[in-house]
Amino acid sequence: EDKVVQSPLSLVVHEGDTVTLNCSYEVTNFRSLLWYKQEKKAPTFLFMLTSSGIEKKSGRLSSILDKKELFSILNITATQTGDSAIYLCALHEGSSNTGKLIFGQGTTLQVKP
Amino acid sequence: GAGVSQSPSNKVTEKGKDVELRCDPISGHTALYWYRQSLGQGLEFLIYFQGNSAPDKSGLPSDRFSAERTGGSVSTLTIQRTQQEDSAVYLCASSSQGSNQPQHFGDGTRLSIL
């Protein structure tokens, strides 16, 4: 059965720290892996990864995928209080025409001033 | 508006009542998805619509749940004879056509069953 496991489940850091969030997965037919940030309401899209070893970057956030070891990491450097949120990893499985995403449990990040 | 719009934002109802949740996707997006997020749990897929194709209903938890998408745009998720375990945030997402397009989410409807 396809599944996504995120770690840690929660994390507390201070402003300026660097954090690494982990996402491991098991899948029959990989299509893509996505990261979302969820504050109070809608998850907002961060990155979509399809190829191994190619880093995606947006400001202080970056992410990379390892399709051999079946994991992805999301890095946040110089954290700010506004980075406090739940970070969701999701897998897009490709053996059928369904567009459904399989989500991990999320990592709750709290950044203290 | 630019984003996915859902209504109502909050719904409180008594056990046994029917509820209807609405989703208005991003203009031009052909794919529409419903997910459920229960307290302390990840998002759980419910149903997927793509253009005129038959929907993927594989995630619907029981026959009390149904969804429609009229005219390829607005969708409604209906829960009949609600139970307390139906309490959750129901999130809608849409994406543009293509095999690998990211899904963009609405703010969700928080459903509470008393």
Image (cartoon, coloured by chain):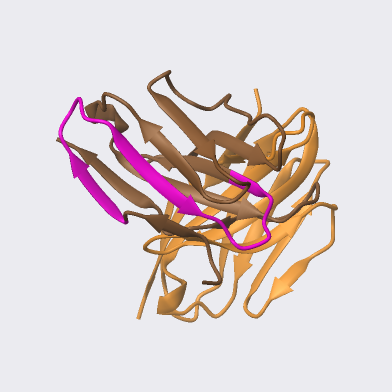
Q: Can residue A17 be seen in this view?
A: yes
| The one of A5 and B59 positioned closer to us in this rendering | B59
Q: Residue at x 60, y 53 (%)?
A: B94
In the rendered image of this protein, does residue B9 appear above or below residue B46? below
Q: Which residue is drawn at 52% across and 62% down?
A: A37
Q: Give percent across and percent down for residue B59.
A: 53, 27
Chain A as rendered: colour: orange
In the rendered image of this protein, does residue A2 appear above or below residue B11? above
Does the magenta portion include A44? no
Q: Give percent across and percent down for residue A29.
A: 80, 32
| Residue B85 falls left or right of residue A8 | left
Q: Give percent across and percent down for residue B62.
A: 42, 19
Q: In which quarter of the image is the C terminus of chain B?
A: top left
Q: Which residue lies furthest to the top in this view?
A: B63
Q: Give the range drawn in magenta.
A: B9-32
Does the magenta portion include B24? yes
Residue A69 image-quadrant placement: top right
Chain B as rendered: colour: brown
| The one of A26 and A10 positioned closer to us in this rendering | A26
Q: Is residue B39 visible?
A: no
| Residue A33 falls left or right of residue B21 | right
Q: Residue at x 35, y 40 (%)?
A: B20
